[in-house]
DNA sequence: GACGTTCATTGACATAGGTCAACTACAACT
DNA sequence: AGTTGTAGTTGACCTATGTCAATGAACGTC
């Protein structure tokens, strides 16, 4: 049995965004080799859309969803109250984010920059890939990584000073979206100071003051609202506090 | 092909603790129906031990491990520094905990009460169950639940007051290990005030003061070091702060 | 390229929670 | 039951961070 290319099978209803999202999804999860009917089910379950800055990526309102971020940058937010937001994580192209529909708090995946997302209803998605062990293993691997990340963040939230939190976030962003040159790293932050504050359990003012201190100390330079040049990554890492085992 | 009972096959080297741990593990994950060789691999990978209060459950020192808690109570701890511990979660019988060996911080799973644990080296465990979709799905389900829990805790750490954190923890413990009677709940806390403080990102003194306030307000009564009687669950939940969607 | 809006910075002040230091009560052991 | 060590409580004080308010810098818009 030959395996037709699901994306170029000439079905006219598949728009450019849907096509691109699925191509990236296939690349990330290696679904090409899957049984034809499983691939078809995955395609029928996934809804691809483009969302603008500030828009919510919630597609399935009453169901937990699994969102693949094909392009752009998003923040996952939970609200302790209307005026008390907690940003749980920032996400970039290639990330898979599980967004709960009804949990202890209200959740939302919000675009920081125009983004292309592919959303699946979690339960039905899992049913569809039930027998595809390879995907299940990859799913578990990613969820486990997200859990590890969340735990590390918890240490930050519970036991680190404002400066350590800000320095750690900058180093994380340097690693994820930074452009290295010489001994410097250039970062174009897609999120606002408010988003950073909400992710670190601080206020905008405190975040701003810490940026100021790091700038005064000569560790970073800021350009415009979103530009950050890390002049001394070593020293910045130092200020992020002890990280290694038993440090 | 008949499927011999792996636990009563009369192999003399299996001690009582190992037997009990595996029985509980089988019950929790339904591994009974698995292929004989997979079951054998699982059994050969799992190390069952009994640990006393304060002892670490770390078995595989250089590998991430998956620990099934068959009996007792444990805390998962990460150290930001030697004197800055963050308790990430409390665990009870039936829980599966993934403990990283080398991460951003040093991790440890420490017994709060004498416990029976069954440890697996994560990587080899996953290889062994590679084709058992049912277990992979369950593994993913549990990891996803742990992630959801961790995220909820993050909201607490980042955006809640000391009183809200303490009240929330008490309600959580009421739900997990509380004994309900009339409109009251009796809790026997297995963890110390220090553990609670480390889990909530507070100090022992602050936790103690919050217990005092809740006691003075008539919401709880304390008996001895570990006994807590929740007199007014409704009011206590209130003090845990807004939880529902968009509250 | 001036205008206005939004976002970021800076300063003055307030406070929740941390720190340090007694004191008290529980529980384990003789 | 008395003794002793550990854990918990309470009080006085301190500080990191929050709050409120004003100013200033980016960026989008006409």
Image (cartoon, coloured by chain):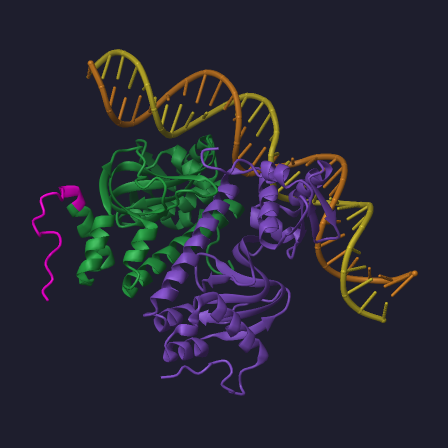
Chain colours: A green, B purple, C yellow, D orange
Q: Nearer the viewer, residue A235 or B183?
A: B183
The reply, left or right, for residue C5 in relation to residue D6 is: left
| Quarter location, residue B202 | top right
Which SS does the magenta portion mostly show? loop
| Quarter location, residue A173 | top left
- How many numbered tags mark residues here? 0
Residue sitting farthest toward the left: A10
The reply, left or right, for residue A181 in relation to residue B154 is: left
Residue B87, given in percent of the width and then of the height, sits at: 55, 54
Residue B188, given in percent of the width and then of the height, sits at: 67, 54
Position of A238 relative to B34 (above/below) = above
Q: Residue at x 48, y 60 (%)?
A: A245
> Is B17 included in the stretch rendered in magenta?
no
Q: Residue at x 38, y 74 (%)?
A: B34
Q: Nearer the viewer, residue B132 or A76?
A: B132
> Is A6 included in the stretch rendered in magenta?
yes
| Quarter location, residue C21 | top right
Q: Which residues are magenta?
A: A1-18
Q: Residue at x 30, y 53 (%)?
A: A125
Inspect this view and state whether residue A226 appears.
Answer: yes
The reply, left or right, for residue D14 in relation to residue B224 is: left
For the N terminus of chain A, the image quarter is bottom left
Residue B181, given in percent of the width and then of the height, sits at: 68, 49
Q: Nearer the viewer, residue A18 or B194?
A: A18
Residue A128, given in percent of the width and then of the height, sits at: 28, 57
Position of B199 relative to A136 (above/below) = above
Inspect this view and state whether residue A152 appears.
Answer: no
């Amino acid at each position: 049995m030959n395996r037709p290319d699901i994306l170029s099978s000439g079905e006219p209803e598949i728009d450019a965004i849907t096509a691109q999202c699925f191509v990236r999804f296939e690349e990330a999860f290696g679904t090409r080799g899957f049984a034809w009917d499983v691939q078809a089910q995955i395609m029928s379950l996934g809804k691809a859309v483009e969302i603008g800055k500030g828009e919510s990526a919630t597609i399935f309102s009453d169901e937990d969803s699994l969102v693949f971020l094909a392009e752009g940058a998003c923040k996952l937010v939970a609200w302790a109250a209307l005026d008390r937001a907690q940003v749980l994580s920032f996400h970039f192209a290639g990330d898979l984010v599980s967004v709960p529909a009804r949990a202890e708090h209200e959740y939302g995946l919000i675009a920081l920059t125009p983004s292309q997302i592919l959303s699946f209803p979690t339960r039905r998605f899992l049913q569809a890939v039930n027998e595809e062990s390879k995907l299940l293993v990859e799913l578990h691997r990613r969820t486990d990584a997200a859990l590890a990340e969340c735990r590390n963040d918890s240490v930050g939230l519970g036991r680190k000073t404002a400066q350590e939190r800000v320095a750690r976030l900058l180093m994380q962003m340097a690693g994820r979206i930074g452009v290295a040159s010489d001994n410097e790293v250039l970062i174009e932050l897609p999120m606002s100071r408010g988003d950073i504050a909400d992710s670190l359990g601080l206020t905008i003012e405190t975040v701003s003051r810490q940026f100021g201190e790091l700038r005064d100390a000569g560790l970073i330079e800021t350009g415009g609202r979103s530009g950050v040049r890390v002049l001394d990554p070593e020293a910045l890492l130092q200020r992020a506090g002890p990280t290694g085992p038993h440090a």
